[in-house]
Amino acid sequence: MIHITFSWNLVADVRQMLMFRFMVNALRAGTIVAVLAGALGWFMVLRRQAFAGHTLAIVSFPGAAGAILIGASATVGYFAAAVAAALVIAAVPRSLGGRARSGESALIGTVQAFALAAGALFVSLYGGFLNGLTSLLFGSFLGISSSQVVALLVMAVLALAGLAAIGRPLFFASVDPDVAEARGIPVRLLSSLFLVLLGLAAAEVSQITGVLLVFALLVMPAATAQQITVRPALSLALTVLLGLATVWLGLGVAFYSIYPVGFFITTFGFAGYVLAASWQAANGRWRRASGRDATVAVAA
Amino acid sequence: MNPILAWHAAGLAGRIASGPLSGIADIAGQSFLRYAFLAGAAIAAASGLVGYFMVLRSQVFTGDALSHVAFTGALAALAVGADLLIGLYATCVLVALAMAALGTRGHADDTVIGSVLSWLLGLGALFLTIYTTSSTGANGTSGVNVLFGTIFGLSATQAITDSAVTLGVCVAMVVIARPLLFASLDEAVASARRVPVRALGFVYLGLVGVTAAAATQAVGALLLLGLLAAPAGAAQRLTSRPFRALWLSAGLAIFSMWSGLLIAYANPRIPPSFGILSVATGIYLIAILFGGASRRSALAGGPART
């Protein structure tokens, strides 16, 4: 067995890391996942749907556990569960005043808890699957095959193409739903489509990061970027870059450490967010990229 | 006490019970079942009361975050070899108060909650690794138990502590219910009338933290959100009168807890958490289908359905 040690010669370190097939695949998969999660997470944060995103990320767990239980492919389970949950959440009427909103959050919470309970049931029915359970929940970048990378890439391209197709009206509908509605933009339909895309992305990402840590890649880069700039195009690009940096750094450090990659990815992501937020606070401009600012920036 | 042994004992007990009458005698006779039913009722009552305000104040995501914090807190305690209960309560209450402090008027922004939540989960993954790699004889089971709960594995001490703490939460909720309701429904008028809105927000989130810590042992860190959200959501659908909804929420939570325990007891392959949450989700579903249209007349439909 080759002994792996960290030296301060970073070029040699990276070269050593890339000698391992699994690490190359992990970096490829991480790159795909970071771009996809960044783009969809940016819209999620803009639309303040973090709770829905978190729930969509988590429902993949019973999906995968159920699929393994009945002997189907876990990948199918991930996607089926996430899309089904997205449709359930989208079925609740939004924008009907405060009461409907609080009802919506109760529904999302119930969907999430029930999905997890179903996952617990599947795990208990399957039995003797505890090691798999930990990697299902917390992910494993190890042991990703080249064919899995191709599958990830295909799904990511499809989801990103879908997002690109609805991107402009979705942005309008997110920033100012009332005006968008008046201009004849199908706000409700766009919202449902977005939730389905978010579900697809969450299902895809959770195969790599584990169900519990998908949300980190969805929310942290986007939250950080929207702290730094209010210009939409710039902050979207920044989100993707931050996501990539977080994943690469996390993978690199985890390679030389005995601790899980999920811990490093969330820690780097959170550190970025805290830095951006404190910088923002220090500048005395504690204002989020609110819709109105963004619209002005688009017009300018 | 080894939760896994208790788990198998639960399965055995379920198999021994043949008829409903001997089943009831069994429940009264088996100490772990008695603990599960008593502590479960207290935990469910507190979750129902706390959950009602959580839904009313649109703070369900905060509850979600706290339930994940419970996981990290418990594993941190296990990793450093401290008492599990102390880890749970300390982490939940501290994070709950921090969330109240982070947001304006005791409400945190959902992006802030999301970022904190995912980082704490990452920390949980770290503690899980430290715990499973450092201590001899430990395996992934403890982590799984924290996530999904072991209500049939409660020891006498745990059951008594949990019941006492959650009953305390119930009393505190009843005491602050009226001003908290005022502050939640119309914050501006409430603060004009000198209701301490901000302090109430802190006290309330602190109580949520305590409930989360207690409920983690019963239904698990990942599932307690359902106990908070589903009965409260159903109660809000069934009646528009606040205090009636508050009591209804607590009643539905206790009903879900006991039915879920009975289901798990009757069929040992079903984890109790799943039984509890299926009943709660079922009630919520019925409330959505029948409660929205005619609020007043539908009131009788929810709790009476057995």
Image (cartoon, rainbow, N blue to C red):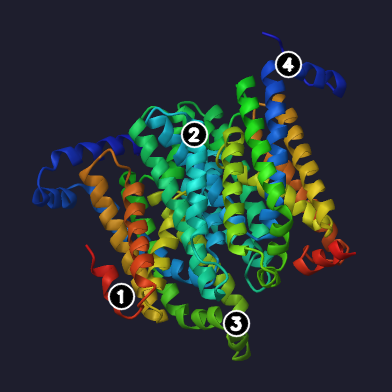
- Amino acid under disc 3: Glu
- Amino acid under disc 2: Val
Question: Mark 3 or mark 2, which is nearer to you?
Answer: 2
What residue does disc 1 label?
Answer: B298
What residue does disc 3 label?
Answer: B187
Query: Which residue occupies the foreground of this view, A240 or A227?
Result: A240
Q: Earlier in the sequence, mark 2 or mark 4?
A: 4
Q: Chain of mark 2?
A: A
Q: Earlier in the sequence, mark 1 or mark 3?
A: 3
Residue B12 sits in quarter: top left
From the viewer's perspective, is residue B169 above or below residue A73? below
Question: Mark 4 or mark 3, which is nearer to you?
Answer: 3
Does A293 sit left or right of B298 as displayed? right
Q: Chain of mark 1?
A: B
Q: Secondary structure at mark 3?
A: helix
Marks 3/2 same chain: no
- Amino acid under disc 4: Ile
Q: Who's the residue at 40% across and 46% down the image?
A: A117
Q: Secondary structure at mark 4?
A: loop
- Amino acid under disc 1: Ala
x and y percent of residue A115 in the render? 44, 47
What residue does disc 2 label?
Answer: A76
Res. A278 in view: yes
**Crowd around label 3: few <14 · some 14–19 · many ≥20 (10 Å):** some
